[in-house]
Image (cartoon, grey):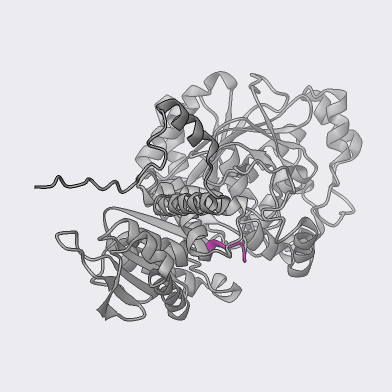
């Protein structure tokens, strides 16, 4: 039988040559450039697909060839990747309008999750059902695209579960349950559906809804009773929005997490249109820190190729400061909340004189309740230094019932005994009974504790210290409370504020200082129409300050600022003169 010839599928035409010559010849032979180009392009395509399966930003670039790459969107995708992987459980992202957030989070992200994690259960909420449905249609188009099938060939939408607002994938053989997608408008029903990944994109429709207490309460109730209760164990929640109001969904969640560590603690990626110029990582103890993770200098645009600084400045002028600060800078303020500016305050380290010229005072603004929704009891130790500046130090703040608040006040008095602190407590309603309780405690007999009557509205009580702060005369002694304090102060309006305990406490302490240090009624320090009689002369003021031990330059500074008036917008508020 003839021996079968072995067929070489890759014959070497130079097999008859010596091994040495063969190697030399092969080195001289090169594949055509067209073939090499095709091989390289094939390798690049395979690499792109593999990256698209692993990272959100690469997924977007692969499935959306016309996508405009920007640094801030790469950063957003980086944080969302951590959220998808479970490294972050609660994530908020704040960006200006028209900066690409919805393309990333509402259109591409759900498709990416459902392809990468078979069995994922996604619920997406937005301010209206129509918008949510539009996002759902876009996501379905992505899943049905050829490029998506190149990445996740087993991810196919089931024909029998393919409605606009509720659809699912075909389950894989011997795999987890089918991935499912549900979308709803804020306030809409999602009962019966649980989620592994919950996404809320733009929970606020417009300024009208943002200012409506009814809409705000409806949104909050939907969050607490409908959306949040759908979370499966270990589920992740992502909120992405343009800020509108301090009382929007994100604002209320931020306030909740700052008030109680048992509430969900959120990681916040804050991206203002123009950088505030503070570099560094996000501070988990300061959820509204101004850190710029892109390393931008102050005033640098977020997306300069789309909105340069000149364009943004024009937008600022056209829409006004109120909307600019909220929508573009992600720093919403209440209507009328321009009474206090953050840049009025300077932080000072290591300031603790035992005997400042004015002596130390501590005013307690009591709010006796342990409910997380209630106001806070708050107090600061304050003095006027030898340099004439007003110093605010050592915040004590919490939500306590009276027995615990009583204990906190006692501990604070004992801790500050060497400083000789003069204690004032707001005297209103049931607080008169609390003051009497403290004054009759044997442990506190050696301390001076006095009730301070409150007979004017909050704004009028606050104007004297606000006018001093406007001149840069109020300094904060360094502490972890500094930034949360300033964040609350700049939102102060004097009318139905969500949080105003910090302002109340500083106002009370300042009014104690004014009457104690200068020696005449605090009313004489307030911006009022000049009276023909009863107002102290400059000589009388100077003499009183000299007797208190003030330095000459400090005395002059106080005198120079005696007739300071509030800013024009405060002057226009008719309540000032009531």
Report the residue at 50% width, 61% height from top: 104
- Can the viewer see residue 138 in this picture? yes
**Residue 360 sits inside the magenta stretch:** no
Report the residue at 67% width, 20% height from top: 355
Q: Give 195 or 317, whichever is nearer the viewer.
A: 195
For residue 552, what is the image quadrant? Answer: top right
In screen coordinates, is 247 left or right of 174?
right
Residue 101, horizontal then vertical, whole percent: 54, 61
In the current view of this chain or complex, which residue is farthest to the left?
1
In screen coordinates, is 209 left or right of 168?
right
In screen coordinates, is 275 left or right of 388?
left
Residue 37, horizontal then vertical, whole percent: 54, 52
For residue 549, what is the image quadrant? Answer: top right
In the image, the segment drawn in magenta is: 98-102
Report the residue at 72% width, 63% height from top: 578
Q: Give 126 or 435, whichever is nearer the viewer.
A: 126
Q: Give 48 or 177, whichever is nearer the viewer.
A: 48
**Residue 101 sits inside the magenta stretch:** yes
- Can the viewer see residue 221 in this picture? no
């Amino acid at each position: 039988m003839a021996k079968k010839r072995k067929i070489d599928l890759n014959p070497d035409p130079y097999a008859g040559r010596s091994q040495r010559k063969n190697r030399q010849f092969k080195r001289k032979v090169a594949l055509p450039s067209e073939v090499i180009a095709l091989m390289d392009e094939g390798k690049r395509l395979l690499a792109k697909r593999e990256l698209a399966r692993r990272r959100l930003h690469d997924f977007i670039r692969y499935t959306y060839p016309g996508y405009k790459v920007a640094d801030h969107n790469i950063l957003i995708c980086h944080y969302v990747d951590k959220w998808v992987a479970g490294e972050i459980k609660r994530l908020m992202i704040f960006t200006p309008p028209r900066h690409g957030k919805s393309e990333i989070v509402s259109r591409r992200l759900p498709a990416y999750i459902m392809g990468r994690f078979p069995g994922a259960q996604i619920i997406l909420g937005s301010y209206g059902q129509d918008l949510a449905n539009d996002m759902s249609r876009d996501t379905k188009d992505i899943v049905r695209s050829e490029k998506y099938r190149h990445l996740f060939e087993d991810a196919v939408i089931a024909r029998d579960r393919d409605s606009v607002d509720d659809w699912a994938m075909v389950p894989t053989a011997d795999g987890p349950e089918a991935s499912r997608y549900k979308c709803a408008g804020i306030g809409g029903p999602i009962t019966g559906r649980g989620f592994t990944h919950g996404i809320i994109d733009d929970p606020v429709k417009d300024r009208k809804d943002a200012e409506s207490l009814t809409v705000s309460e409806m949104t909050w109730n939907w969050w607490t009773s409908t959306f949040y209760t759908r979370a499966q164990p270990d589920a992740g929640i992502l909120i992405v929005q343009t800020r509108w109001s301090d009382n929007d969904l994100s604002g209320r969640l931020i306030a909740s997490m700052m008030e109680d560590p048992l509430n969900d603690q959120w990681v916040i990626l804050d991206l203002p249109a123009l950088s505030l110029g503070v570099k560094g990582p996000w501070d988990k103890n300061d959820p509204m820190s101004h850190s710029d993770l892109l390393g931008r200098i102050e005033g640098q645009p977020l997306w300069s190729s789309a909105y340069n600084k000149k364009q943004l400045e024009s937008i600022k002028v056209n829409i006004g400061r109120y909307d600019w600060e909220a929508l573009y800078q992600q720093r919403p303020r209440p209507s009328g909340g321009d009474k206090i500016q953050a840049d009025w305050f300077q932080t000072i380290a290591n300031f603790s004189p035992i005997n400042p010229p004015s002596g130390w005072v501590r005013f307690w603004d009591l709010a006796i309740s342990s409910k997380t929704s209630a106001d806070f009891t708050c107090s600061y130790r304050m003095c006027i230094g030898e340099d004439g500046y007003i110093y605010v130090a050592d915040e004590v703040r919490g939500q306590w019932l009276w027995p615990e608040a009583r204990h906190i006040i006692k501990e604070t008095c004992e801790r500050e005994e060497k400083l000789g602190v003069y204690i004032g407590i707001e005297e209103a309603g049931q607080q008169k009974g609390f003051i009497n309780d403290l004054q009759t405690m044997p442990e506190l007999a050696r301390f001076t504790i006095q009730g301070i009557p409150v007979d004017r509205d909050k704004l009028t009580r606050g104007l004297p210290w606000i006018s001093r702060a406007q001149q840069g005369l109020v300094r904060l002694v360094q502490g972890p409370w500094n930034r949360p304090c300033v964040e609350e102060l700049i939102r102060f309006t004097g009318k139905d504020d969500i949080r105003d305990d910090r302002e109340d406490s500083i106002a009370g302490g300042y009014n104690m200082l004014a009457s104690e240090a200068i020696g005449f009624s605090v009313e004489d320090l307030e911006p009022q129409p000049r009276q023909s009689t009863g107002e102290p002369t400059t000589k009388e003021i100077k003499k009183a300050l000299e007797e208190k031990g003030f330095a000459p330059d400090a005395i002059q500074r106080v005198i120079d600022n005696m007739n300071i008036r509030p800013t024009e917008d405060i002057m226009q508020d008719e309540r000032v003169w009531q």
